[in-house]
Image (cartoon, rainbow, N blue to C red):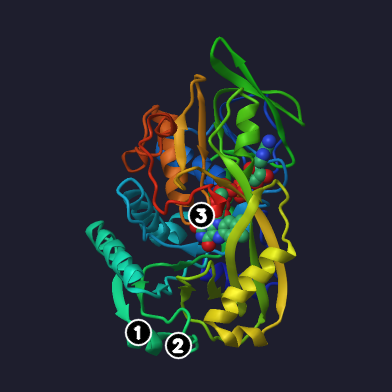
Amino acid sequence: MRYSGLSVLKEGLFGNKGWKPAWREPEPKAEYDVIIIGGGGHGLATAYYLAKNHGITNVAVLEKGYLGSGNVGRNTTIVRANYFLSGNSEFYSHSLKLWEGLELDLNYNVMHSQRGILNLFHSDGQRDAAARRGNAMVNQGDDAELLDREAVRRMVPYLDFEQTRFPIYGGLLHRRGGTARHDAVAWGFARGADMRGVDLIQNCEVTGIDIQDGRVRGVQTTRGPIRAKKVGIVAAGRSGQVAAMAGMRLPIESHVLQAFVTEGLKPVIDHVVTYGMGHFYISQSDKGGLVFGGDLDFYASYAARGNLPMLEHVMEAGMTLMPMIGKAKILRSWGGIVDMTPDGSPIIDRTDVGGLFVDCGWNYGGFKATPASGWCMAHLMATGEPHEVARRFRLDRFLTGHLLDEEGTGSQHNLH
Ligand SMILES: Cc1cc2nc3c(=O)[nH]c(=O)nc-3n(C[C@H](O)[C@H](O)[C@H](O)COP(=O)(O)OP(=O)(O)OC[C@H]3O[C@@H](n4cnc5c(N)ncnc54)[C@H](O)[C@@H]3O)c2cc1C
């Protein structure tokens, strides 16, 4: 069923009785060409592009909960291409271009909104760093504008420009950055993959990985064993645990990252704004809630829930930058388990086990990577070779020391 304005109108007039489920609920088959472990954004996108770009459709996505129950439905929805280092910048640039055509491609409204991202800076040193980052973005073919304090004041007058401790010097504006409705992205990729024949198996936890003579042969699941010629581990915060089933120890630490939303308010924040002196960033959802987040929890954990110390930390930063936020009531908070690498950059690579691939290490920022991660992981699984825009996302950089260290923090929580 194709979605269109006309179909919405027709269904609205006739009681919305004609909508069909957006994907099937198939029973798992005994064998597939490809199994993807993890029905988050990246796993679903991988399955979608395997089918669409490479014609590989005998594919199953195995998800232990329901589709989109992980970080793809828990993030703060920011989409941007403002990376500095070669290796990251071409990848995220490619991803943003995919985002710009995603709704047409999927025939699904993911509410991609290029409302602009403003990264504030608060010192001469930060201004220099922002100028360098902006130049790198422009060199990559993306957009960046360096704004002075007055230009920032005109754009976001509600910030506290009088504060003396961390005065606002200006901001780096990335107009093509913005937000997208996170769970719609999972649903859109799920529907697109299902339409091309991919089996999406929910409530199916992978409990073991079968390896024989150095090659992957399939997986053990809570719904029985399933054979496969190739297996992709795309399990985000659980990547370390799933890889351990194949005897691997990934360079991943899992930490909780929290987010917050206020009650619905009238439109007040038109952009995404990030604070340069505290870990705080904010945007307003289409329902009116102010959506914001901050730092990750400093201890490793698999508990996908919030806690009060980090809540206080983030609220303090929010009040410092934007005192008006103190009038809003927080509606809820939540946590997701993020897969942190030592250099803060991701991994899309083969492993030493034949036919077994990993896509992980997305740190704070994997939502914006969703289309390109799926695109590149599908390319790798189909051809055996890394895609050119993901060629630096190799596992062996942690052996050789050729790191891709964008911020110098990675999983090193005391540096955040
Ligand atoms: C609070 C928060 C805010 C964030 N904000 C942003 C942001 O603004 N912008 C941005 O770019 N990124 C953001 N991120 C990061 C981003 O959400 C993640 O990097 C990204 O979603 C991870 O990829 P995924 O969507 O595939 O993960 P997930 O949705 O977590 O998918 C992994 C799936 O694997 C499944 N799984 C795990 N183990 C098994 C198993 N054994 N068997 C079967 N299935 C299994 C899980 O149930 C899960 O559904 C944020 C994250 C959090 C938590």
Q: Quadrant of residue 44?
A: top right
Along the line of sight, which residue is nearer the eye, 31 or 141?
Answer: 141
Q: Write down the residue under mark 2.
A: 161
The number of discs equals 3
Q: Write down the residue under mark 3.
A: 415
Q: Are the two marked residues, 2 and 1, in contact with CB atoms closer than 8 angstroms?
A: yes
Which residue is found at the position 62% from the left and 75% from the top? 316
Mark closest to the chain's N terminus, 2 or 1: 1
Q: Quick check: 376 above or below 129?
A: above
Evaluate whether residue 17 shows in this view.
no
* Position of residue 7 measured from the top left corner of the image (x, y, whole percent): 57, 67
Element assignment for label 3: helix
Q: Amino acid at mark 2?
A: Phe
Q: Is residue 241 left or right of residue 94?
A: right
Along the line of sight, which residue is nearer the eye, 364 or 371?
Answer: 364
Residue extending furthest front? 165
Q: Write down the residue under mark 1.
A: 149
